[in-house]
Image: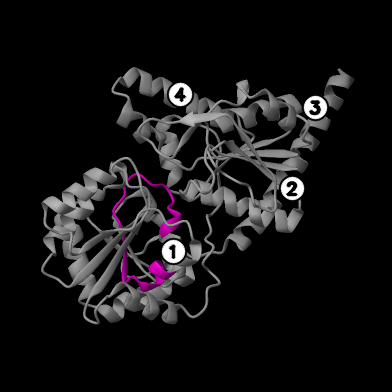
């Protein structure tokens, strides 16, 4: 059995939890032998076709709905998890679930894969003002990845962050996918949703999907939108997070409430796809993200994205080819939006090209993942057998 370990899982929605969900769904279809290990969330009922093992947790202050897990003290969970016959474990974070995966790998003498998804330093620095403590936590993160048999990153530019943190080992690039690649009748979705939202014929619709946290540069985004307030547009924010009230207050203070709508978290993927299809432009000014799924999801629905030039997440974007790039200032970002909406035919062509170049399906990605797992398992046991043979000869 393959074990997928992460500190959150749907209905807690972020890019990593969706990645794990899609890994599990397609691995179950292809191999029939996968499980997810994650902290408990109140009121959650498992309806997936694969088993999910949850361990005790408490809410993380200021980070609702995320949970802090305690697998070591959950004895019934321990009894269940240690009876499973894992052939490989895959940790998608270096914290409670990742450390559990590492212990299982060492105890059962099986390989462990670890994917580096997030810029953890930014998370630490937001809540911890002691630089020495931040450095100690980062060292623990890097020690974790150094102990894995193979480390994966979702795109090449992420390696720079890992090296900056102090990681010296090898990395493998394994792309992220999206679950909107096979959607048909996109134009019909677009027209139906725009009518439902009351978008006028001469209005542009902008969209952001993701956590409402300051690290995503959302105050920057509001400031940029304020600079183009005279243009006909509607902006929709989907998601939630600790900074949501602050961001909404900024919108009110600037008198933009008639143009900007906050929709909260949307867990219905079909409904979410309608918003992507209806949008003219996906606005993503984050410097925090490594390889955001939302940019790929927008591309799958033929909606181009505007990102910050030289951001890690912008590596897959060629300006005015399969997306758009702006310099890192609210004024430059605003100017770029104006330039884009004044060339609707180019915006349409860029959206089409984005769908061809950066919208890979999860089914395709997980087929590659399954092959990689088999190769890792084979190499691991070949190496172990050879090591045992050498010891016996000695």
What residue range appears in magenta?
274-294
Identified at 27% across, 79% down, the residue is: 344
Q: Find residue 76 and report its horizontal and vertical position in percent.
A: 70, 27
Disc 1 vs disc 3: which is toward the camera?
1
Q: Earlier in the sequence, mark 4 or mark 3?
A: 4
Contact (Cβ within 8 Å) of mark 1 with mark 2? no
Contact (Cβ within 8 Å) of mark 1 with mark 3? no
Q: Earlier in the sequence, mark 1 or mark 3?
A: 1
In the picture shown, does residue 63 fall above or below 255? above
Distance in Å between CA atoms under marks 1 and 3: 51 Å
Quarter placement of the N terminus: top right
Q: For residue 269: magenta?
A: no
Q: For residue 277: magenta?
A: yes
Secondary structure under the numbered disc 1 in the rendered image:
helix
Residue 387: which disc? 3
Distance in Å between CA atoms under marks 4 and 2: 30 Å
Distance in Å between CA atoms under marks 1 and 2: 34 Å
Q: Residue under label 4, please give it.
A: 139
Q: Residue under label 1, please give it.
A: 272
Contact (Cβ within 8 Å) of mark 3 with mark 2? no
Distance in Å between CA atoms under marks 4 and 3: 30 Å
């Amino acid at each position: 059995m393959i074990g997928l370990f992460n500190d959150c899982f749907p209905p807690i929605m972020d890019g990593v939890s969706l990645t794990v969900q899609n890994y599990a769904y397609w691995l179950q279809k292809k191999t029939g032998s996968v499980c997810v290990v994650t902290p408990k969330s109140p009121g959650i009922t498992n309806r997936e076709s694969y088993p999910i093992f949850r361990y005790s947790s408490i809410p993380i202050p200021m980070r609702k709905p995320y949970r802090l897990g305690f697998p070591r003290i959950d004895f019934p969970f321990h009894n269940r998890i240690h009876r499973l016959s894992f052939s490989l474990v895959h940790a998608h974070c270096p914290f409670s679930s990742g450390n559990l995966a590492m212990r299982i790998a060492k105890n059962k003498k099986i390989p462990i894969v670890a994917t580096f998804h997030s810029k953890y330093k930014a998370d630490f620095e937001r809540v911890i003002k002691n630089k020495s403590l931040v450095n100690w936590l980062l060292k623990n993160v890097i020690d974790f990845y150094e102990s894995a048999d193979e480390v994966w990153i979702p795109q090449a530019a992420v390696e720079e962050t890992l090296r900056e943190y102090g990681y010296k080992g090898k990395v493998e690039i394994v792309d992220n996918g999206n679950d909107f690649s096979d959607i048909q009748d996109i134009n019909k979705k677009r027209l139906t949703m725009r009518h439902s939202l009351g978008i006028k014929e001469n209005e542009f619709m902008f969209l952001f999907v993701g956590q409402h946290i300051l690290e995503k540069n959302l105050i920057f985004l509001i400031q940029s939108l304020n600079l183009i307030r005279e243009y006909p547009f509607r902006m929709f924010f989907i998601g939630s997070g600790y900074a949501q009230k602050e961001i909404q207050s900024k919108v009110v203070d600037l008198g933009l409430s008639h143009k900007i709508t906050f929709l909260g978290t949307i867990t219905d993927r079909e409904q979410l796809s309608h918003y992507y299809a209806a949008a003219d432009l996906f606005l993503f000014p984050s410097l925090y993200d490594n390889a955001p799924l939302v940019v790929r999801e927008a591309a799958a629905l033929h909606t181009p994205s505007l990102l910050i030039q030289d951001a890690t997440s912008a590596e897959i974007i060629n300006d005015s080819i399969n997306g758009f790039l702006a310099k890192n200032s609210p004024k430059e970002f605003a100017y770029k939006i104006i330039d884009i909406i004044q060339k609707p035919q180019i915006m349409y062509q860029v959206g089409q090209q984005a769908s061809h170049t950066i919208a890979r399906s999860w089914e395709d990605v997980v087929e590659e993942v399954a092959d990689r797992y088999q190769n890792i398992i084979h190499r691991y046991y070949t190496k172990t057998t050879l090591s045992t043979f050498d010891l016996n000869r000695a």
